[in-house]
């Protein structure tokens, strides 16, 4: 199969018969030229639908003309018929693999599909056949950066949607086993912490906030039908030293009354007026700057833990960072709730 080149009208008049064709190439070119020229005028006027129809008519008359497929690809692209535009671009390349325009058309379609990595490959092919094209060189530079940005955005979205705190809390398992004695009890506690932390992270991702509350883990063997809910809202607890002390006293009694095994505090940093645990200096120095986020404090009679989960906003997406374990002596939000 020969390589087809783009010929002028005068050149096609002397072109020989194409293998297997019943109509001389010159005649086919003449039959296609009228619809193609009309299509070009309509394309320039922004009437892409009629332009595409005329290019199709021209293709029927001269189906081996790469220029016609290139033109129709451009029309389909403007009509946002991207799959059809891509097929025509591929056909253009197949008919004339040495012509830069086919690769250019393909790159433009892939760019519209937001397949930036593939578009860069196509534009690089185009540049090989037309090294002087500044337009293509600029597209390669811009799309390379867009591809990086898209990949990073996808990574952030994956992190937002696939919240898995268990892998970050895995080192806690051995300590829970030692402190709580039985595997069943330690696994229950571990799941309790993971579930609360994951729910808080998902809430933060959705709304950039979490409700200030303490969630209790009741002893199932001692639970009673009329027991209160395992959640206590504490949004007013951190206004002053007095409110913190009063809240802690209430929560301690609540834990006793409900036969609770453990509890978890979740509170956004932004609502804490006291204690401002990030104000310490020296050995108590806060290492997270002005970063926004929330605290998760685990309480039980045998083990206490504290984490800070910071957040950032990148390109409009709120993203929680990995939990950071904190020194309870320096940064405890609430005093001990279990004796």
Image: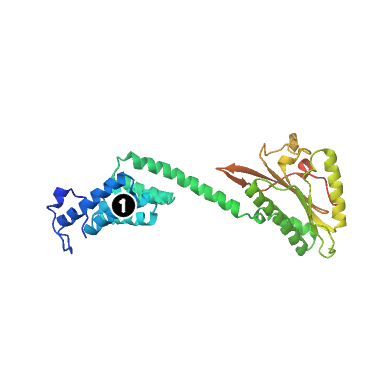
x%, y% of residue 253?
Answer: 87, 52
Q: In the current view of this chain or complex, which residue is farthest to the left?
A: 14
Who's the residue at 15% across and 52% down the image? 12
Who's the residue at 71% across and 40% down the image? 270
In-front residue for pair 39/155: 39
Residue that label 1 marks: 50
x%, y% of residue 286?
Answer: 71, 38
Indicate whether 290 appears above or below 251. Answer: above
Q: Residues within 10 Å of mark 1 (few under 14, many from 20)?
A: some
Q: Is residue 248 visible?
A: yes
In-front residue for pair 290/258: 258
Who's the residue at 72% across and 59% down the image? 191
Q: How is the image coloured?
A: rainbow
Horizontal side of residue 305 vs 226, given as left or right = left
x%, y% of residue 335?
Answer: 82, 45
x%, y% of residue 164?
Answer: 64, 55
Q: Is residue 121 visible?
A: no
Horizontal side of residue 172 vs 219, given as left or right = left
Q: Quadrant of residue 275?
A: top right
Who's the residue at 61% across and 45% down the image? 318
SS at mark 1 in the image: helix
Quadrant of the frame with the N terminus: bottom left
Q: How many marks?
A: 1
Horizontal side of residue 177 vs 321, given as left or right = right
């Amino acid at each position: 199969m020969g390589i087809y080149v783009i010929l002028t009208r005068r050149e096609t008049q002397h072109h020989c018969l194409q293998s297997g064709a019943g109509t001389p190439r010159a005649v086919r070119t003449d039959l296609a030229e009228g619809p193609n020229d009309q299509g070009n005028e309509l394309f320039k006027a922004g009437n892409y639908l009629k332009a595409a129809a005329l290019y199709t008519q021209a293709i029927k008359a001269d189906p081996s003309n790469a220029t016609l497929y290139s033109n129709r690809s451009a029309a389909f692209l403007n009509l946002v018929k991207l799959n059809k535009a891509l097929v025509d671009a591929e056909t253009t390349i197949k008919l004339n693999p040495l012509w830069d325009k086919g690769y250019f058309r393909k790159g433009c379609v892939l760019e519209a599909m937001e397949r930036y990595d593939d578009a860069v490959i196509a534009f690089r092919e185009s540049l090989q056949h037309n090294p002087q094209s500044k337009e293509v060189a600029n597209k390669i530079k811009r799309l390379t950066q867009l591809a990086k940005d898209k990949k990073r955005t996808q990574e952030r979205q994956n992190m937002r949607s696939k919240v898995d705190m268990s892998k970050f809390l895995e080192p806690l398992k051995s300590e829970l086993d030692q402190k709580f004695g039985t595997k069943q009890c330690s696994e229950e506690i571990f799941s309790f912490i993971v579930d609360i932390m994951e729910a808080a992270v998902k809430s933060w991702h959705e709304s950039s906030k979490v409700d200030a509350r303490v969630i209790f883990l009741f002893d199932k063997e001692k639970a009673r039908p009329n027991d209160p809910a395992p959640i206590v809202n504490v949004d007013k607890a951190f206004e002053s030293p007095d409110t913190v002390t009063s809240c802690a006293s209430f929560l301690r009694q609540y834990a006793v009354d409900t036969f609770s095994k453990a509890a978890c505090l979740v509170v956004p940093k932004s609502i804490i007026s006291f204690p401002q645990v990030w104000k310490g200096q020296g050995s108590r120095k806060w290492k997270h700057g002005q970063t926004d986020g929330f605290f998760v404090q685990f309480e039980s009679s045998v083990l206490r833990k504290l984490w800070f989960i910071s957040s950032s906003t990148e390109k409009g997406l709120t993203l929680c960072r990995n939990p950071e374990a904190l020194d309870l002596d320096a940064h405890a939000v609430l005093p001990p709730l279990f004796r």
